[in-house]
Image: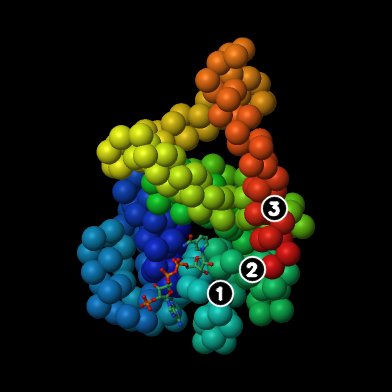
Amino acid sequence: MKKIGFIGMGNMAQAIASGWIGRKLLEGDQVYAYAPHQDKLKKNAARIGFIPCREPGEMVAACDVIIMACKPYQIEGVLKEIGDRLGGKALLSIAAGWNYRKYSPYLGDSTRFQYIMPNTPAMVGEGVMLFEETNSLEEEEHEEIMELFRALGRVEIIPDHLMGVAMAITGCGPAFVDLVIEALGDAGVKYGLPRAQVYALASQMILGSAKLQLDTGEHPGVLKDKVCSPAGTTIRGVDALEHKGVRAAFIDAVDAIMEF
Ligand SMILES: NC(=O)c1ccc[n+]([C@@H]2O[C@H](COP(=O)([O-])OP(=O)(O)OC[C@H]3O[C@@H](n4cnc5c(N)ncnc54)[C@H](OP(=O)(O)O)[C@@H]3O)[C@@H](O)[C@H]2O)c1
C-alpha cells in the first residue's frame, strides 16, 4: 500500500488510523495527517504512530491517497486551499453528505474519488463502512482500499440513491441501540441488578444476538420465534413491545431521518 494522509485527525480519523497501524496493515511511516491544532495532532501522532504535518499541502505532497476527515462545513475551504494539488491522487471522503456528485465540480479529471461512510463501532473494529457505488478509483486501488477498511468492520457497496437510508440505519442506528441498552439497564436496576452489570449483560446480549443473525443468516423473525416458547415468558415481553408499537417506532425513526 502507498502512503495515506488524513485531512483532520478527529474521532473518526483516529479510529481509522489506529485500526490500520494497530493491526499492522500499515506502518506508521505510511500514514500522515494534518489538523490545525498542532499540539493535539502531535500528541495523537505519538500515541497512534502516524507522521504529523504542519501544512495540508505538505501532507498532500507526501501521500498518494488522501482521506478528507474534517467536518463537512470545512471542506469547501480545504478544497480551495489544496484542491489544485489533488491531481493524480486518490481522494477518499468520510464527511457526511459530501458524495461523488457533490465533489465532482471541485475536482479535476485526474483526481480519483470515493465517498465512504463509516460508523462509530469502527472504533472497536466492528463498524459498517458504506462505500458509495459510483467512484472513480482504479479497480485494483478500490480493492486495496476496501481491504484496508475491512480491518474496521464490514464493507458494503451501496447504490448512490440508497446511501441516505443506509446511513440512517448504520450511522444513526448505534444511538437507537444505545437507547435500548440504557432502557434495559433501567429495567434491570428496577429489579435489583447493579447498573454496570446490567449494561454489560444487555450489551453482550445485543452483540451475541447480532452475531447469531449474521453467522446463521436466519430471518430475524425465525430467531425470535426460537426464543419464544408457547405460553412462555419471552412471548409475554414480545407482546408488550408490540402493544407499544416497537416496530413502527423504529420505522418512524428512520422516516424522521429521511425527512430531515
Ligand atoms: N464521528 C462519527 O461518528 C462519524 C461517522 C462517519 C463519518 N464521520 C465524518 O467524519 C468527519 C469527522 O468527524 P469527527 O467526528 O472525527 O470530527 P472531529 O472529532 O470534530 O474532528 C474534526 C477534525 O477536523 C480538523 N479540522 C478542523 N478544521 C480543519 C481544517 N480547516 N482543515 C483540516 N482539518 C480541520 C480538526 O482539527 P483540530 O482538532 O486541530 O481542530 C479535527 O481533527 C465528519 O465530516 C463526519 O461527517 C463521522
- Name the residue carrying label 1: 72
* Sequence order check, earlier mark of 1 and 3: 1
* Label 2 within 8 A of ligand 1 by Cβ: yes
Q: Is residue 139 visible?
A: no
* Count of marks overlaid on the render: 3
Instruction: Name the residue rendered at 37%, 81% in the picture.
Output: 36
| Image coords of residue 113 (percent x, y) | 63, 64
The front one of 229 and 46 is 229
Which quadrant is home to the C terminus?
A: bottom right
Quarter-of-image position of residue 189 = top left
The front one of 74 and 238 is 238
- Name the residue carrying label 2: 97
Crowding at mark 3 (Cα within 10 Å: few <14, some 14-19, many 20+): few
| Image coords of residue 105 (percent x, y) | 71, 79
Crowding at mark 1 (Cα within 10 Å: few <14, some 14-19, many 20+): some
Type of the residue with mark 3? Asp
Of tags 3 and 2, which is closer to the observer? Answer: 3
The disc placed on residue 252 is: 3
Instruction: Name the residue rendered at 54%, 86% in the picture.
Output: 77
* Sequence order check, earlier mark of 2 and 1: 1
Helix, strand or loop under label 1: helix
Q: Is residue 170 visible?
A: yes
Residue 44 vertical position relative to residue 203 in the rendered view, above or below: below
Residue 238 vertical position relative to residue 67 in the rendered view, above or below: above
Tell me whether circle 1 and circle 3 mark residues in contact (CB < 8 Å).
no
Instruction: Name the residue rendered at 29%, 42% in the picture.
Output: 196
Instruction: Name the residue rendered at 54%, 50% in the picture.
Output: 176
Give the CA separation, mark 1 to mark 3.
26 Å
Quadrant of picture, ligand 1: bottom left
| Image coords of residue 211 (percent x, y) | 50, 30
Residue 16 vertical position relative to residue 225 in the rendered view, above or below: below
Crowding at mark 2 (Cα within 10 Å: few <14, some 14-19, many 20+): some
